[in-house]
Image: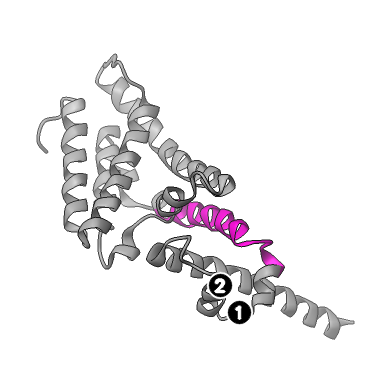
Amino acid sequence: MAARTGKARAGETAKQDAKAKLLEAALTTIRTKGYAATTVDELCAAAGVTKGAFFHHFKSKEALGVAAAEHWSQTTGEMFAGAPYHGFADPLDRVLGYVRFRRSLLTGGVPEFTCLVGTMVQETYETAPAIRDACARSISGHAKTLEADIEAAIAARGMVPGWTAASLALHTQAVLQGAFILAKAKGGADVAAESVDHLIRYIELLFGAGTR
């Protein structure tokens, strides 16, 4: 019995490993080639698993896309939760620290720093509603992590703005996603970094912080 239980556990681990490998392969391959150009065969080859393993875990390529968006949210969420800008005492410094942290990630080739969900939603917003909705949840959920610090920065400065913390949080994502598009169009990170620098200046002016 113990031997059979051990084999069963090993089989379950192998299945979980295959799913994890496919999700990681999706993050890399889709950011490099785009969703439409990425095939199931390519994902299986990149993950080192069989096509049977793919369809054991995902009913379709679209199902993989939804799962990849969720995996992206979890993976990047953990990274941002542990980022150093959370340690700043001033909430505005935390907001600006977040943007500067995003700027620091603009390294390597374009597929290495661009956003999986931003890439997928541009291709699938009409053709794959399930992926579109998963990408929307990812982007909106990430933006929501900024809202408390923005609200605190507003309160700390006694501001009564005609805009909301939620709208500014989403605006940061609009600028970042646009910066990724420019990086793809120009073939490098420099133009994206300039856009992020403008975002920093905009937030400073919005809060009357001046040049820091």
Nearest the viewer among 203 and 6 is: 203
Q: Position of residue 167 (x, y in %)?
A: 36, 28
**Element marked by disc 1:** loop
Q: Is residue 41 left or right of residue 114?
A: right
Residue pushed farthest bottom? 3
Q: Earlier in the sequence, mark 2 or mark 1?
A: 2
Residue pushed farthest front? 127
Q: Position of residue 77 (x, y in %)?
A: 46, 51
Magenta stretch: dominant secondary structure: helix
In the rendered structure, find residue 49 and report the number of the disc placed on it: 1
In the rendered structure, find residue 99 and report the number of the disc placed on it: none
Q: Is residue 144 above or below residue 177?
A: above
- Residue 106 visible? The answer is yes
Nearest the viewer among 78 and 28 is: 28
Image quarter of the N terminus: bottom right
Numbered disc in front, either 2 or 1: 1
Q: Position of residue 133 (x, y in %)?
A: 54, 42
Crowd band around label 2 with a 10 angstrom C-alpha radius: few (<14), some (14–19), many (20+): some
- Residue 101 visible? The answer is no
Nearest the viewer among 15 and 156 is: 15
Residue at image mark 2: 21
Determine the CA span between mark 2 and mark 1: 8 Å
Image quarter of the C terminus: top left
Magenta range: 56-79
